[in-house]
Amino acid sequence: DVKVTQSSRYLVKRTGEKVFLECVQDMDHENMFWYRQDPGLGLRLIYFSYDVKMKEKGDIPEGYSVSREKKERFSLILESASTNQTSMYLCASSVGVSYGYTFGSGTRLTVV
Amino acid sequence: EDQVTQSPEALRLQEGESSSLNCSYTVSGLRGLFWYRQDPGKGPEFLFTLYSAGEEKEKERLKATLTKKESFLHITAPKPEDSATYLCMDSNYQLIWGAGTKLIIKP
């Protein structure tokens, strides 16, 4: 069964910490995405990548960066965590947007 | 501004009571309208893609339809296991998501 695996289901970090969220897919997909999901706001795209070492900003990239050194791995980095980054973070991959996404189970991050 | 709007925000039904969820979009040049199901604490799961007005797709008790301005997700004789949040998304260049409809089916 194809999978997108996110390294942590729950994470609690302190304000100002550097936070790494890891995502690995085993489907050989070129496209990978990071979203955050907040009640009433839906899914908002943070960053996406169409190829190794390539990244594009989404709708809300401020305070985040990403790394894609290998095709199967896409990392989201919170440079200096803040309380307004408390959210559910979802990673997804796709062979092409028109074919839909496969999502991971999400990481619920709490910044205190 | 391109938008995808879902209604209602929440819907409570009795088991077996059929209904429809709505997804309206103002996006020009729609490339594809996607429906996903999301269970609590999990990532969304792909259900359907619709590309052109008049298109319909079915899966078990769910049927998705598309017009030029909106899509409907019809649920026929739902069961409690159909309870979830249903999300729609437009795959135009902006990848715009609706906020979702929370569906609760009571036994």
Image (cartoon, coloured by chain):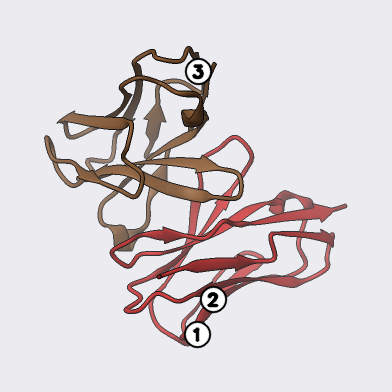
Chain colours: A brown, B red
Same chain letter for marks 2 and 3:
no
Q: Reply above or below: B8 against A81.
A: below
Name the front one of labels 2 and 3.
3
Circles 2 and 1: CB atoms closer than 8 Å: yes
Separation of residues labelled 2 and 3 (CA atoms): 37 Å
Q: Is residue A15 above or below residue A82?
A: above
Q: Is residue A74 visible?
A: no
Q: Which of B29/B58 is in front?
A: B29
Residue drawn where x is 45% and y is 76% of the image: B26
Give the alpha-carbon distance from disc 2 to disc 1, as whole Å. Answer: 6 Å
Kind of residue at disc 2: Ser
Q: Which residue is mark 3?
A: A11
Circles 2 and 3 in contact, beta carbons < 8 Å: no
Going by the numbered disc 3, the residue's amino acid type is Leu
Q: Amino acid at mark 1?
A: Thr
Q: Which mark is residue B67?
A: 1
Task: Tell me which residue sits at (18%, 41%) in the image.
Answer: A55
